[in-house]
Image: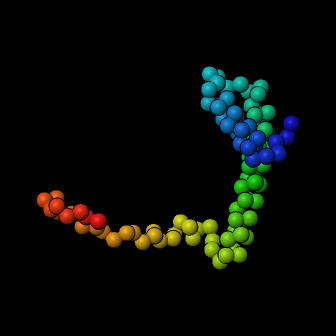
Amino acid sequence: MATRTFKEAYGVLQQHAQTLRTQQEPNIDDLLSIVTESVDAYKVCKERIDAVEKALEKALGDTGATPNDAARSPKPPSAPDRVAPDLDSDDVPF
């Protein structure tokens, strides 16, 4: 069965990675199918990621922003520093 969604393809990649990590000795008989399925799943993931990036660039291009602008935007102005109240005073600090 060919994967069609990012989630399915990513699941295939995770499953194969786990299989390769945990096997005690290489199973050469299954290696070709694991590699073939993994490459196909990678292509699905890459296509979906590229499509999302393109859509984001288009959407942000309409606003004049770029995807990297969010990372470069300055911090919002902080509230003015408040002076700690005199602890010996009976005045309410508000």
Quadrant of image for the C terminus:
bottom left
Front-lying residue, 1 or 38: 1
Answer left or right for 92 relative to 65. left
Answer left or right for 80 relative to 13. left
* Count of numbered circles on the image: 0
Give the colour scheme of this rendering: rainbow
Residue at image point 45% right, 68% down: 75
Quadrant in the rendering for residue 64:
bottom right
Front-lying residue, 22 or 94: 94
Quadrant of image for the N terminus:
top right
Quadrant in the rendering for residue 24:
top right
Residue lying furthest right? 1
Residue at image point 77% right, 54% down: 47
Residue at image point 42% right, 72% down: 77
Position of 19 relative to 47 (above/below): above
Answer left or right for 32 relative to 82. right
Answer left or right for 88 relative to 55. left
Residue lying furthest top? 24
Whether residue 58 is visible, yes or no, is yes
Position of 85 relative to 44 (above/below): below
Q: Position of residue 78 (x, y in %)?
A: 39, 69
Q: Position of residue 51 (x, y in %)?
A: 76, 59
Quadrant in the rendering for residue 19:
top right
Residue lying furthest left? 88
Residue at image point 19% right, 64% down: 91
Whether residue 39 is visible, yes or no, is no
Q: Position of residue 88 (x, y in %)?
A: 13, 59
Front-lying residue, 11 or 23: 11
